[in-house]
Amino acid sequence: QVQLGESGGGLVQAGDSLRLSCAASGRTFSSYAMGWFRQASGKEREFVASISWNIWNHLTTRYADSVKGRFTISRDKAKDTVYLQINSLKPDDTAVYYCAAGPVPGPNQSGYNYWGQGNQVTVTS
């Protein structure tokens, strides 16, 4: 069974940092684009960041404007794991964070055909 499993979320204070992880099982996603999305209570799921290999086999990243400078996406090809480092957390970052894998990087959710179950991040002020 193909799965993406997120971990690393929890309850943190504003200003803290944390790192989310997303590990693949059941198949390898090493050549896929990987993305992070989040959904706050009562809001639609939104794009956070993506990472993919370009035609020169270099990693390229994209970020939502709202997280640039505070969020960093990375991946470990050998571990088939993608990470989301979040610094200077704000209460507005409170959401369920989802990782996703698919052929098309970027903010369009239809570009991803595998999704994790979601991981709650709660930021208190």
Image: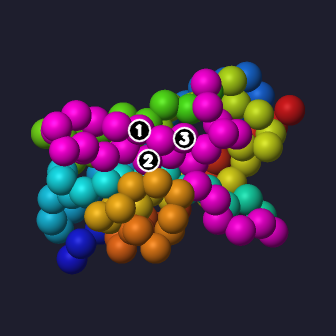
Circle 2 — which element? strand
Amino acid type of the residue that numbered disc 1 sits on in the rendered structure: Thr
Per the model, the C-alpha gap separating discs 2 and 1 is 6 Å
**In the rendering, at what x and y percent does residue 56 appear?**
16, 37
Q: Are marks 2 and 1 in contact (CB under 8 Å)?
A: yes
Q: Nearer the viewer, residue 121 or 58?
A: 58
Residue located 58% across and 55% down the image: 47
* Amino acid type of the residue tagged 3 in the rendering: Tyr
| First in residue order: circle 3 vs circle 2 | 2
Q: Which mark is residue 15?
A: none
Foreground residue among 118 and 99: 99
Is the residue under label 3 in contact with that under label 1 (CB below 8 Å)? yes
* Above or below, comparing residue 67 to residue 49 in the picture: above
Question: How many residues crowd around disc 3 within 10 Å: few (fewer than 14), some, or many (20 or more)?
Answer: many
Q: Which residues are magenta?
A: 42-69
Q: Are marks 3 and 2 in contact (CB under 8 Å)?
A: no
